[in-house]
Amino acid sequence: MSQPLLKVENLTKLFPVSKGFLRTPTDFIHAVDGINFEIQPGESLGLVGESGCGKSTTGRMLVKLMEASSGHVLMSDKTHTDDLIDIANIPNDQMKRFRRRVQMIFQDPYESMNPRRTVFETVSEPLTVQNIGSLKEREERVSEMLRLVGLAPPDAFLFRYPHELSGGQRQRVAIARALVLDPSFVVADEPTSMLDVSIRISIMDLMLKLADEFDVSYLYITHDLAVARYMCDRIAVMYLGKIVEIGDTEEILGNPQHPYTKALLSAVPVPDPSFKREEVEILGGITKAINPPSECRFIERCPWAKDVCRTSDHPPLEDKGDGHYVACHLVESALTSA
Amino acid sequence: MTDLGQRAPEPDLEANAEAVESQEIAKAQSLWQIRWALLRRSFRNNWKLFRRNRIGIAGLVIIGFFATLAIAPSIFFATGFWSTSVYDPVTGLEPNPPSQQLEIVQTVTDPNTQIDIRQVLVDGRINGNIGDVIDVTLQPAPPYGKHWLGTDPLGRDILSQLMYGAKAAFGLGILAATVTVLIGTVVGSVAAFYGGKIDAFLMRLADLLIMVPGLAILIVISAVVRFQLWHLAVVIGILSGFGGVAIVLKSQALAVKVKPFVDAARVAGGSNARLIVAHIIPNVMPLSFLYMMFTVTSAIQSEATLSFIGLLNVDMSWGLMIQLANNQGYLLQGGRYWWMVFPAGLAVTFIAMAFFLVGRAMDEVVNPRLRKR
Ligand SMILES: Nc1ncnc2c1ncn2[C@@H]1O[C@H](COP(=O)(O)OP(=O)(O)OP(=O)(O)O)[C@@H](O)[C@H]1O
Ligand code: SF4
Ligand SMILES: [Mg+2]
């Protein structure tokens, strides 16, 4: 494999469960629990899972909005050597440079723009804080970005406030802001889930087009496998802080191995991005991993669970061929016995 | 996708103004011109909301009235309509006070002091006899042509004092409110943004300032140092800014801090200072303007109280006018000397009320906007 753009190693985030004033917490939510994956340059990875499984937490750690509890996020550093650098060790004076390469698009278009700043101020902010260009140059750059995201003519939008834009237009502004620094990696946290069904597909198309033009990789977070299929080259399925299956999009959708992935897929009978899936209820269900036991995270809901699952630890992600990784004790036997 | 904002239909005039502004924005050469046009637009939109509120308009009218009063003396003195020697609120003196003709009807001797009361009142004319008609100078003089609100016991013009008091009240109120807003916004935003120890430290200080009774503190301080009006403004500004206002603005800032646009700015590389100044403060500012109004109210009331107790070192103010009337025994005379008491008393009441009303009306403009979306 070539040098990845981004490599995540045993990334973990624990949130202490508040036990009252001034008491040392003993309970932790294992929001993200030792996950591993890689993203190649120009490739997009879909992170799929139900609400609360730790998708946003993962994304926020990748852009350093949150410190990891343990584990590493390694990024290639184009300007220096081919070495990967740990983003936790980036010295303060180089943070700004890191910020140029990694951006984020947020879920809620109504909250992701400062209501007191115009479109121009919002989109030019990254340029301003990075000290790029003169005012005139910034104006030109912002206009160009607005045109690229389909807000034309730019003059009609530059000096509008967020409340004068529709949800779709705001999300276009957010995309322009994320790409104005020409980053190589963008975390997109459910960018279309709060939009009107009728405009989702146009925003998704726009993001695909721009990914090409800007040569940018997305970590595309969604709870909708159909959306992930539309947007991504590879898909990682997450369950309560663990990645349970990861592989090429068509492989995951055409040949799912993990019982959870299968359940997700059966809940999406047609690949229709506008379809809003009910929460998967396989067997009962816990929604938070507070001090989870060491065995398979999925065991309480798994229809296949056997003795081996109860007696061994959470299964590691294992390569089942062609970069298709699955974390389940029974998958091999399930394959062979089938 | 095609709905470009949701502008409600508006009356022609405003639509026109908006169109003109849009053109201005399109034609504007510099960013500053655009900002100015945008500022005017947002001001007009807020004004539209405010205008619907009768109470707020009433408050504005009252404030406007007192503002006129505050400006008037400078004009009167400059144009020579008033001469300083007569109308100066502190050093002025009416040279020819009006007098009243009284006839001596009987002599009364105070049983305690054995002083002939009539003699004293008759201003040294000890030899008056029953039946004599004498001139008695009226000081304090009731309102008459030359002094519309009469004079005080020293022959100074009450209207002039009232106007001077309005000026003092505005200066005091505005300075106190500005200090309040500056301190309240910065302390609240910083505490919310950094959290942890900084937050704990600032909030304990705030608790302390809330717990101490403001007036008592003012009295203690003014007993130690001779208090000027602007000292008072700063102290009131600190007390209310660091106390209640900081706490309210902090909770507001906490809500703003977790908004994705703050995260977006951080991801773009914005420093903490930038996040606070460009994103958090502008979003808590409207609420702080509200508290500005309430601070003006409490500042003016405190001034009146402190002056009345005689703890404020001030040339002239409404509080001082009432204090003078009281010290010299004119206050409790059943309204006989009403012109020395009512104008100042009503002025304090009305202006404090006016700022409060404007604050309430602003509340309705500001708060739905924060809750909306
Ligand atoms: N700041 C926080 N403090 C405490 N717990 C948190 C915090 N952020 C997230 N969590 C918890 O961590 C878990 C994972 O949250 P996360 O937001 O990453 O889920 P998600 O997969 O993005 O869900 P959704 O699809 O609803 O956005 C949840 O149980 C959540 O309650
Ligand atoms: S390891 Fe066992 S419990 Fe876990 S998913 Fe596989 S079969 Fe189910
Ligand atoms: Mg999320």
Image (spheres, grey):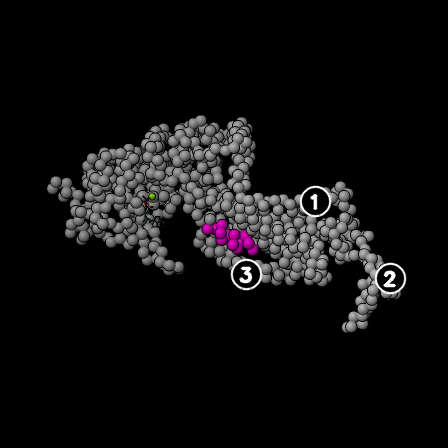
Mark 1 vs mark 3: give the one in front: 1
Q: Does any atom of ligand 1 lie closer than 8 Å to the CB of label 3?
A: no
Q: Nearer the viewer, residue A334 or A133?
A: A334
Q: Is residue B87 left or right of residue A167?
A: right
**Could you say which disc has been placed on residue B72 in the image?**
1
Residue depicted at x 76% and y 45%: B82
Whole-percent x, y for residue A239 in the image:
26, 45
Residue type at the position of mark 1: Ala
**Could you say which disc has been placed on residue A52 in the image?**
none
Q: Nearer the viewer, residue B291 or B225?
A: B291
* Number of residues whose C-alpha sits closer than 10 Å to that of mark 2, classed few (under 14), some (14–19) or many (20 or more): few
Q: Which residue is mark 2?
A: B132
Chain to which mark 2 belongs: B
Q: Is residue B298 magenta?
A: no
Q: Is residue B132 left or right of residue A196?
A: right
Q: Is residue B291 visible?
A: yes
Residue depicted at x 64% and y 62%: B223
SS class of the residue under badge 3? loop
SS class of the residue under badge 1? helix
Range drawn in magenta = B239-251
Q: Which residue is mark 3?
A: B212
SS class of the residue under badge 2? loop
Whole-percent x, y for residue B348 in the image:
63, 53
Q: CA distance from mark 2 to mark 1?
A: 44 Å
